[in-house]
Every structure is written in C-alpha cells, then in structure tokens.
Image (cartoon, rainbow, N blue to C red):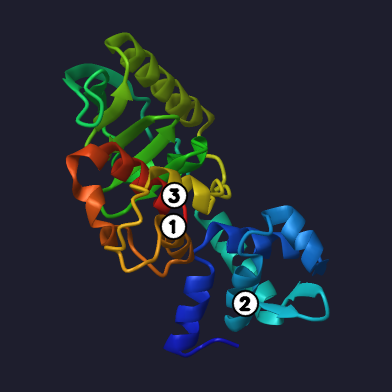
C-alpha cells in the first residue's frame, strides 16, 4: 500500500486527471473489461491512463479486465467520507445582489466585444468554493480565491472580494442578463441552505486544448507539434507557460480559455 513520499506522489499524479478519476468511479461499481472502461471514458490514451493508475497501486489488471485494488477501494471510501464531512452549510450565508456594473471596456482579443467589471454584495469570501458544483464549467482557484466559470466564449471570474469580471460580452444588456443569471443561481443555492455535492468535472479532450493553441508547430515548447503539446498538457507532463507564443497579444483570448480548460485536468 502506498505510504512513502514517492508512492504518494504517484497516487496524487494519477488522481489529478479527470479521466482517471472517472475510471476509478466507474470501477467502484465492480470489475470491468477494458472494452467497458473504454466505452465509458473514451479510448483516447486509455492505455496510458490505466498504466498510471496501476503504477499508483489503485487498480489491478488481468487478461482484458480491470478492477480496483484493495488500496483503490479504501482510497475511494476515504475520499467519499471526507466529501460528506465537508458538506457546506449555507444557512448563515446572505443572498447576494449585483450592486453595479462599474466598467465596460473593449476586449483585448476582440475589440467588437467587451470586458465587464462588476460588483456583488455582500462578498462571498471563502464560501465561493462550495458554489463550484453549480456551474458545469466552474473551477475554484485557491490561489486567487476566485470562482472561474466558462460558458461558450464568455469567461466569468467571481472573486471573494465581491469583484466580478466577464470577457467576450456582446453588449451591456448581455452583461446585465448574465449577471442576473449568476445571482439567481447562487441565491437559489443559498435559499436551499446547502450547496450541491461536488460533481465530476467536465471531460476535456486533447483536441479541445489544441483548438486554442497557436497551431504554428513552432517547437518553442520543446515538442514536435502543438497537438503533441496538447497531449503532454493532458498528462501533466507539460505546463501552459512553455507555450511562449501565447504571451503575444493576438493570443490573449486563447490563453484565457486554455487557463480555464487546463484547470479541469
């Protein structure tokens, strides 16, 4: 059973990917064939994902079959118990209101659209994290104490301080409508008193990441092509910072979308 730092690192790496977490949850219902696992999570990089889970002692593999190891079953059980312990009580949280839309500025990446800066009150502070499950493409960042939400081209960031930013907005009317929907979604959860249970994050495919890369195959990241770089991002073997062309102003929107997408990996 994993116990030393290197083994723990293998487990953390294995469970850092949404596809591998989905495989573990799928196996929790019983032993499966590799075909069944591929049908559930997709066959793209399946061998790679299974290999990492096996190296971490989370699964055992036989002749065309996959099952949770004893450690894997205990790991999921412990994770479930911790999740139940962290169920958020929102009974003391006050409903929010949009107090103002303070700025409507041209987007850097697309001058025909706008970047919006608004305010909500009262600030949600540290309780922001529990609202993450409300949004299919929502990701809470401990680093900046903010909830980042992607819906189509629009990226909304809610900070614990009450500040809200939105990109790729078509008009002030769309901004106000989006903010109103945001307010209603959060307040509905507050009225119920308990935030929804954590949910499995959306699955991100390498092609979705590749779509927002420069696609120049310049090799500055050390990889042969942008698609190879996308695969390395998916497996955690590369970081977004290695793609230096993304720092150019013409790729500002691409970088913003990629930062959201890679947060799900």
Q: Residue at x 54, y 48 (%)?
A: 201
CA–CA distance between discs 2 and 3? 24 Å
Secondary structure state at the residue bearing disc 2: helix
Q: Quadrant of residue 184?
A: top left
Residue assigned mark 1: 230
Q: Is residue 149 above or below residue 200?
A: above
- The answer to whether residue 195 is left or right of residue 248 is right
Residue at the extreme top of the image, as rendered: 173
Q: Residue at x 33, y 14 (%)?
A: 176
Q: Residue at x 38, y 34 (%)?
A: 93
Numbered tag placed on residue 210 in the rendering: 3
Q: Nearer the viewer, residue 34 or 112?
A: 112
Q: Is residue 51 above or below residue 249?
A: below
Q: Nearer the viewer, residue 62 or 28?
A: 62
- Residue 165 picture location, percent across and down: 25, 30
Secondary structure state at the residue bearing disc 3: helix
Residue 99 visible, this angle? yes
Residue neighbourhood size for the residue with mark 3, other residues' Cα within 10 Å, grouped as few (<14), some (14–19), many (≥20):
some
- Residue 37 picture location, percent across and down: 75, 61
User: Do the numbered discs 3 and 1 sit on residues whose CB atoms are within 8 Å?
Assistant: yes
Residue neighbourhood size for the residue with mark 1, other residues' Cα within 10 Å, grouped as few (<14), some (14–19), many (≥20):
many
Residue assigned mark 2: 51
């Amino acid at each position: 059973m994993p116990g030393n730092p290197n083994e723990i690192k293998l487990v953390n790496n294995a469970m850092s990917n949404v596809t591998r977490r989905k495989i573990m949850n799928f196996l929790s219902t019983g032993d499966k064939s590799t075909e069944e696992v591929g049908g559930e999570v997709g066959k793209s990089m399946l061998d790679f994902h299974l290999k990492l889970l096996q190296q971490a002692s989370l699964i055992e593999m036989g002749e065309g079959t996959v099952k949770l190891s004893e450690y894997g079953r205990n790991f999921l059980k412990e994770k479930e118990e911790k999740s139940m312990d962290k169920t958020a009580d929102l009974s003391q949280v006050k409903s929010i209101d949009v107090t103002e839309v303070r700025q409507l500025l041209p987007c850097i990446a697309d001058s025909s659209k706008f970047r919006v800066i608004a305010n909500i009150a009262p600030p949600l502070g540290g309780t922001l994290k529990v609202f993450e499950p409300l949004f299919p493409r929502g990701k809470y960042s401990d680093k900046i104490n903010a909830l980042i939400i992607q819906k189509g081209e629009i990226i909304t960031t809610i900070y614990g301080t009450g500040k809200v930013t939105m990109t790729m907005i078509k008009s002030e009317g769309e901004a106000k409508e989006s903010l109103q929907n945001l307010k209603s979604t959060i307040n509905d959860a507050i009225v119920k008193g308990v935030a929804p249970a954590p949910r499995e994050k959306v699955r991100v495919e390498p092609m979705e990441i590749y779509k927002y890369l420069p696609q120049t195959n310049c090799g500055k990241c050390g990889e042969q092509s942008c698609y190879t770089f996308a695969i390395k991002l998916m497996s955690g073997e590369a970081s977004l910072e290695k793609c230096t062309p993304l720092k150019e102003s013409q790729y500002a929107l691409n970088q913003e979308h990629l930062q959201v997408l890679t947060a799900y990996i």
